[in-house]
Amino acid sequence: MDYMWINAVRGRWRALFVILCLCELSSVSGQARYSIPEEQAEGSFVGNIARDLGLDVARLVAGKARIITKEDRQYVDLKRDKGTLVIKERIDREELCGKTTPCSFSFDIILENPIQLHRVTVEVIDINDNSPSFPQQEIHLKIAEHAAVGTRFSVENADDSDVGNNDIQKYILKPSDHLKLEIQSQPDGSKVIEMVLQKPLDREEEETHTLMLIASDGGEPHRSGTVRIQITVLDANDNAPVCSQPVYKVDVRENSPEGTLITTVSASDADTGLYGDVTYSTGATREAEQMFDVNVKTGQIKLTGELDFEKSKHYQFNVRATDHGGFTDTCKVIVNIIDENDNVPTIKLMSLSQSIPEDSPPGTTVAVFNVNDEDSDSNGVVKCSINSDVPFKIESSLTGYYTIVTENFLDRESVSEYNVTITVSDQGSPPLSSSKTINVKISDVNDSPPKFHQSEYSKNVPENNSPGFSVFTVSASDADCGQNARVSYFLEEKEVNGVAVSSFVSVNSENGVIHAVRSFDYEQIKSFDFNVTARDAGSPPLSSVATVHILIQDQNDNAPQVLYPVQTGGSVLAEMVPRSADVGYLVTKVVAVDVDSGQNAWLSYKVHKATDRALFEVGLHNGEIRTVRQVTDKDAVKQRLSVLVEDNGQPSRSATVIVNVAVADSFPEVLSEFTDFSMHDKEYNDKLTFYLVLALAVVSFLFITCLLLIISVKVYRWRQSRVLYHSNLPVIPYYPPRYSDTLGTGTLQHVYNYEVCRTTDSRKSDMKNMQAMSQSLVSVDGADADTPHVTKQMSGNVSQMSTLSCIACEDDGLLAI
């Protein structure tokens, strides 16, 4: 009785503790309570949780509302889109709570951003779905015939898994001629069923009696269970067994091995012989029968199952002592389970962000987890921690719930992911702990612009490159990843010498390869620069700029150009050298330029061909033509030099200039020798070889024709010279001042008379008067329209004569004919 009272007090304190916890939770979150019958079909409506908690359905969806249970089974499901609770699986109240009443289960509804926790309690209402049942189908009793009226015989209770009105409400014994049924209620709520002898038995009159004990519940419809009682009337046995103590209390540690001796019950019988021999049997519930075994002879109670404090904290059952005379006594055995620290704390993730942006502020929620330890007292008190090498920390605002939040700013480029190990340990002895590792990836944010390997690039490109030539490659890297690290390259628009830079170069947007759009010419542009922008594909995109300097390298693509002496197609330019010229006399200077640069523009001069190589030489670097020896009378008046001007490029390029030199002291001598100079120029023409080959090929056919042509030309020139010599036509004498004979050296006389003869068709000829190149230039050309002319009829095969016009002018001894 004391034990039952203590249990009742403990139950009230536990109920009070639960109420206080619920009140504490209600201060930080909402609560809801529902009642549903057991055995409801799946999908049955439980309640409108959104309305009852004052939440919007949109909040349930946005907050990712979900049900969190401590058990592995979840009986109720949440329909977020409707805000309702429905049955997820069939609920058996007897399986859930056993005989405990009221029967309820609780779960939490958790919402994120911000985190909210709501406690929901669902009470399961019992329905009459179980019939009363006795431990045995048949009970055998032996009663002495001289048993006194009022003798009591205990009967095992029937068991009904239902509770309340659906539990057993009454027992009926049929027939009740000799025995009547009495039911006594115990302080702990249990009932003791006894049959009381109300009429003496007579073995001689009736040796056996068959009774039916019916147990009925109060449910609708009523359910009942029966047990057959077979009574055998024995001869007299006037002493019943007596238990040594009415209640046996024992404490047993959970997880004790099978076969552990719990206690030993004992009873004594004053009778002797067979009537004094006591046997023991248990009247335990099904659960107790599976856990304990009573030795029939000795009364030892041993453990046959595995004790678990978390499933049941105590067991209570009856042990019946019976003698062979049919008398019995009953004692109660109470087994209290002592808790052991045998449950490792469990970690259950409620929410986990697989990745968080690197720009998340401190305090951003990474994960929410629940910790539970089934042990009690200090064995169930837990402490949580995470590894210290991560930028996260643990916060706890709700009992049993913990949040991992960011402690510092994150940088994916430094660390792209973290392994966070959650460690939970209890305060038992020895303490038990468990750990769970979660992987948190840091998602990229476009916070790193592309970076060129160099801020400035310089590249030498040879001129005359082919369009599309790959100049070189610029490269930029981006510390971000994915789309944020995909770099594209763009040419920044600008003008180079008034022309868009895109007409010079282009850049491949994918790989940064710079191509030349056109062929570069060093003589037009020697260098230019432009900017290349590297831009990533983030949102918004980031970019950086690099400057590219292109230096054009000169190639030897230009041959030297001769500026002086000027080469004309119709005139013969001649430098005049007096026969009295000494060694080293400066005849003229060949002036040439090369538009290339560097060594490609370094020019050298040398005599390629010459009428008399021993008479003249040319300066290697300055192009000055000087006499090598003293001029003699034997030297020909007409001297022809071919000067080769060559640059220093690889390969080198060259140009050739023809320099005509007149070795004479007077103009008439010069004119007489240079009148056919233009004809002899053809001998130095590079095409002479072609004409000679052609002449040899047709020599058999044209030999006579050529001979006649030569004779005719000779006659024509002789007659022409005679006409010129005997002509009395006046000419305007002109001579340069430097060529006066004041110094007594080889210069022209003050006055010379020339005859100019023209035919009537001379205006149609190819000869023309050339204007003086300079003050000292003398040009002898065909007459122009303003020159006086004489028309004279000539005989022979030649019908026309070209007019020779001679004008003398002075320019450092240069004579043009």
Image (spheres, rainbow, N blue to C red):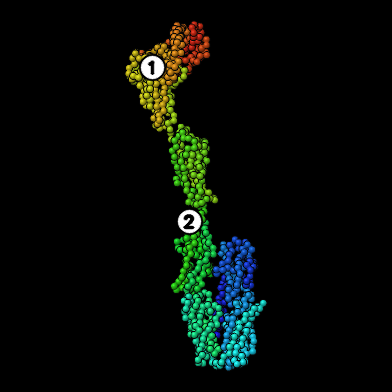
- Residue 676 in the image, given as x and y percentages of width and height: 43, 13
Q: Residue at x 49, y 15 (%)?
A: 767
Q: Residue at x 58, y 81 (%)?
A: 136
* Front-lying residue, 672 or 688: 688
In this picture, is 510 found above or below 409? Answer: above
In this picture, is 53 found above or below 755? Answer: below
* Front-lying residue, 815 or 64: 64
What is the three-letter code of the residue carrying label 2?
Ser
Residue 339 appears in the figure:
no
What is the three-letter code of the residue carrying label 1?
Gln
Structural crowding at the residue carrying mark 2, measured as other residues with C-alpha within 10 Å and reported as few (<14), some (14–19) or many (≥20): some
* Residue at the disc numbered 1: 639
Disc 1 secondary structure class: strand
Q: CA distance from mark 1 to mark 2?
A: 89 Å
* Front-lying residue, 793 or 773: 793
Placement of the N terminus among the 4 image quadrants = bottom right
In this picture, is 73 found above or below 806? Answer: below
Disc 2 secondary structure class: loop
Q: Is residue 273 left or right of residue 654?
A: right
* Residue at the disc numbered 2: 416
Q: Nearer the viewer, mark 1 or mark 2?
A: 2
Residue 440 appears in the figure:
yes
Q: Earlier in the sequence, mark 1 or mark 2?
A: 2
Placement of the C terminus among the 4 image quadrants = top left
Marks 1,2: beta carbons within 8 A: no
* Front-lying residue, 706 or 676: 706
Q: Is residue 759 left or right of residue 206?
A: left
